[in-house]
Image (cartoon, rainbow, N blue to C red):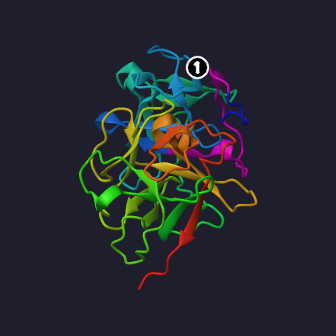
Amino acid sequence: MNQGHTTNETRCATFPWSDYDYKLWQLKIADNGDYELRPMHAIDKSLTVESENENVNVIIYDRSSTKSNKWKIIPNDSNYTSYRLMSNESDYQFALGVTTQRWCKQMSYSSSTTAAKWEIEYVKPLQVPGLEEGVNRIKNVRSGYYLDVPNSATADGTQIKQYAFNGNNTMTSNQLWRVKYHWDGTYTLSPMHCQEKGLRVTGGLNDALVQLYPTDSIPMSGTSVYWQIINNDDSYGSYRIASEASNFTKVLAIENASTLQGANAIEYTFGSANNDRWIFIKIPTP
């Protein structure tokens, strides 16, 4: 919709289909059944309307908790052949539409025209090359230690740390992690001894602690159990693990680049100390 631009207030328009990620959108459920529409080439932005008025521009802008980037997706017929996207900002009076010049605007919906009717086609994101779903041990490049749930704890809020390999390769080990891929291209990472929980972080600030919480509960504002895993394409064969809570601007790291056992897992801006690079070691399952 926006020819690959990533700056705030970029106006959206429609173009013929081609295999570019700026024409792919992540539909993310929000409050009250609304959705955020996030461009895949700029996942920290979302489709936003400039005001509650008719005929204002539709743009991309930094994701926020305001209603200007929330949309109700409503089927236009019982066969779900098309949808209308009604903006929360207008109290659902106006819809996402297209002008004759192809610009996206907020406009009145009419069933007699196609200007505000949309087809939604599901495109399955590709999984990260070289990374396999299933059970993995996750090793920090800098320290050589492994991501660990201390003492096999199961309590909500348990702080995730790094420790030396404990010799336990059973499917209940607190150093083995189930890496699960989700439809929107994100992952959850759950310890095998407590698979209903996973890594969670609160907020998008450096030094935020990474802790254990249920993966199927409704998260508090600013928290998320979802992560993007990105191939670093380096000599270590490592990956970085970016948190959704930070709009994927911060990654899983070891605090203070420590090489000591028991050091905390945190989120931090990706850097050069190798404490934020991770090697996934696939473990065969019985």
Where residue 42 sits, quadrant-wise, is top right
Q: Residue furthest right?
A: 235
| 48 magenta-colored | no
Is residue 70 left or right of 155 when viewed as pictured?
right
Residue bounds of the magenta highlight? 7-26
Q: Eyeballing the image, is 147 above or below 22?
A: below
**Does the magenta segment cover residue 18?**
yes
- Give the residue number, with chain letter if any, for mark 1: 57
The percent position of residue 19, horizontal first and vertical second, equals 72, 52
As drawn, the residue found furthest toward the front would be: 260
Front residue of this view, candidates 142 and 38: 142
Q: Residue sitting at 40 percent across and 23 percent down?
A: 67
Q: Report the label total.
A: 1
Majority secondary structure in the magenta region: loop
Q: Position of residue 143 (x, y in %)?
A: 58, 54
**Residue 252 image position (x, y, % from top left):** 52, 46
Residue at disc 1, secondary structure: loop
Within 10 Å of disc 1 (Cα), the crowding (few <14, some 14-19, many 20+) is many
Residue drawn at point x = 43 percent, y = 50 percent: 262
Residue type marked 1: Asn
- Residue 66 horizontal side relative to residue 129, left or right: left
Depth order, front residue of 20/134: 134
